């Protein structure tokens, strides 16, 4: 048995490895070293008393047994007792941050890190004392610790992200993209650490050697790097938040931002479709963020009533008297009529001689004044924002009279109801002002008459068109 142990020791261990491990073991502290030495001496004395001779194979079996027993006991204490009590406490707690802390297996992964550290300490000790075959376990344990530290970082970032979502902090900061960037950098770093552990080289040497591969890395991770930079810029400039209403015609996006990732921004459109926009496109291209409108408390109404130009004319005295009965129009008519009469008298215009003389009230002007006063009195129109009715440039079919105001709510359905109510009223009172709506194909915007048959060569009143 002793010869077998010595042969295993000669095959696996050499002098340089043993010296390196011995130097590493000395750095753990003299107190721990003395305790381990005393424990090993006690075990050897115990084996000699029972008549078992200390050998390489015997030490290997003893080391593996102690390691397994310690690992099982520690796993039972951490996972069956401590973590179970912790999870039960979090379920009973009413505090949000305590409930979130136990999500994403954060403490479970930290427990595996602790187990790995204890296992590493044990295997390092036994490798130093003539059980070099366990050096393979040392390497695997280091890889285990690195992996679970990385996973613990992932879990911690997820916990912070979930907690920020619960508390509403993430609506102000796109933490999702930033955390994904941190995860990517952490993965690269711990990947280098794990490779250096396997090849037994300093990780800083490997990091220094990556300089020659910088161009390749930039090409492979181009989208991730651009997305990380864009996410930081979006956060620093407060350009976009989760929950914002975003419109970007280039990508067909018109909806609510539900996620800001490292490489993509997810938008749920109002038709329940999803649009994925590259994160860096939100910095390089233009988009519309409706957040300012939502925070202002008022949404703009900007739409035109189309008026037939042929229906616009001067009003007679009888028609003006009829319109003066309107509560909204009477103050305007009294003031405007007095102003026009004074102007005509000062200029000595004879209104009876020609309709071209002087100034007169028009049905179109009174209609515009009526709509403006109507908007000022409307209970759903915002009082503190711009409100006006303006005449726009005419086109081939009609003269647009644009209503420009803001609703006192930003709720979409309410906004559409207010807008519809205003224009329902605007069109329904057109006849009261002797106006007609202008629209193509109705005949209201044109007095052209087509003549067919035998009368095709006759012109009736100058309004007919000769056709064959």
Image (spheres, helix red, strand yellow):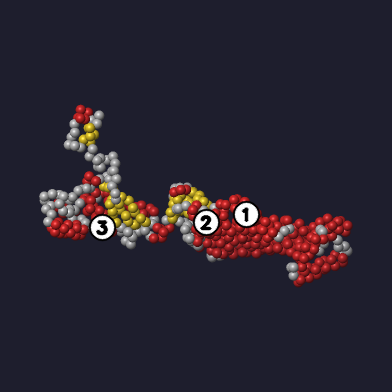
Label 1 or label 3, whichever lies nearer to me, is 1
Which quarter of the figure has residue 87?
bottom right
Q: Which residue is mark 2?
A: 230
- Spatial CA span between label 1 and label 3: 68 Å
Q: Is residue 61 visible?
A: no
Q: Is residue 402 visible?
A: yes
* Of pointers 1 and 3, the one earlier in the residue sequence: 1
Which quarter of the figure has residue 378?
bottom left
The N terminus is located in which quarter? bottom right
Q: Which residue is mark 1?
A: 214
**Residue in view at x 60 percent, y 50 percent:** 220
Q: Is residue 77 left or right of residue 360?
A: right
Residue 163: % across, % down: 54, 62
**Residue in view at x 38 percent, y 60 percent:** 297
* Of pointers 2 and 1, the one earlier in the residue sequence: 1
Q: Residue farthest to the bottom?
A: 31
**Residue in view at x 54 percent, y 54 percent:** 227
**Helix, strand, or loop for circle 1?**
helix
Q: Which residue is mark 3?
A: 373
């Amino acid at each position: 048995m002793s010869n077998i142990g010595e042969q295993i020791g000669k095959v696996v261990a050499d002098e340089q490895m043993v010296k390196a491990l011995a130097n590493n073991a000395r750095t753990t502290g003299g107190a721990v070293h003395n305790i381990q030495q005393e424990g090993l001496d006690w075990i050897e004395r115990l084996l000699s008393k029972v008549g078992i001779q200390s050998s390489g194979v015997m030490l290997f079996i003893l080391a593996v047994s102690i390691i397994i027993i310690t690992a099982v006991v520690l796993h039972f204490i951490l996972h069956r007792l401590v973590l179970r009590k912790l999870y039960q406490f979090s379920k009973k707690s009413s505090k949000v941050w305590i409930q979130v802390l136990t999500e994403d297996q954060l403490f479970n992964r930290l427990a595996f890190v602790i187990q790995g550290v204890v296992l590493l300490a044990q295997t390092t000790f036994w490798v130093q004392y003539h059980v070099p075959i366990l050096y393979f376990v040392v390497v695997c344990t280091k890889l285990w610790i690195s992996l679970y530290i990385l996973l613990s970082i992932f879990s911690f970032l997820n916990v912070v992200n979930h907690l920020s979502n619960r508390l509403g902090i993430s609506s102000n900061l796109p933490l999702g993209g930033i955390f994904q960037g941190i995860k990517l950098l952490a993965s690269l770093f711990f990947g280098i650490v794990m490779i250096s552990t396997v090849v037994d080289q300093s990780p800083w040497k490997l990091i220094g050697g990556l300089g020659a591969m910088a161009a390749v890395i930039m090409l492979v991770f181009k989208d991730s790097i651009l997305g990380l930079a864009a996410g930081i810029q979006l956060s620093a400039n407060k350009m976009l938040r989760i929950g914002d209403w975003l419109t970007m015609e280039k990508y067909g996006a018109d909806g609510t931002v539900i996620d800001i990732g490292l490489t993509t921004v997810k938008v749920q459109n109002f038709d329940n479709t999803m649009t994925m926009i590259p994160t860096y496109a939100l910095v390089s291209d233009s988009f519309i963020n409706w957040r300012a409108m939502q925070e202002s408390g008022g949404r703009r109404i900007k739409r035109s009533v189309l008026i037939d130009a042929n229906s616009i004319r001067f009003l007679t005295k009888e028609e003006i008297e009829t319109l003066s009965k309107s509560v909204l129009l009477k103050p305007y008519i009294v003031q405007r009529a007095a102003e026009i009469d004074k102007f005509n008298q000062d200029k000595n215009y004879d209104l009876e001689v020609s309709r071209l003389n002087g100034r007169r009230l028009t049905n179109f002007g009174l209609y515009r004044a009526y709509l403006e006063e109507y908007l000022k009195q409307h209970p759903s129109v915002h009082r503190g924002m711009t409100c006006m009715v303006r005449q726009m440039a005419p086109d081939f079919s009609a003269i647009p009279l644009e209503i420009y105001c803001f609703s006192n709510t930003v709720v979409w359905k309410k906004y559409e109801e207010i807008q519809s109510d205003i224009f329902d009223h605007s069109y329904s009172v057109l006849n009261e002002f002797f106006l007609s709506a202008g629209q193509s194909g109705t005949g209201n915007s044109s007095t052209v008459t087509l003549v067919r048959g035998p009368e095709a060569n006759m012109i009736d009143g100058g309004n007919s068109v000769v056709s064959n």
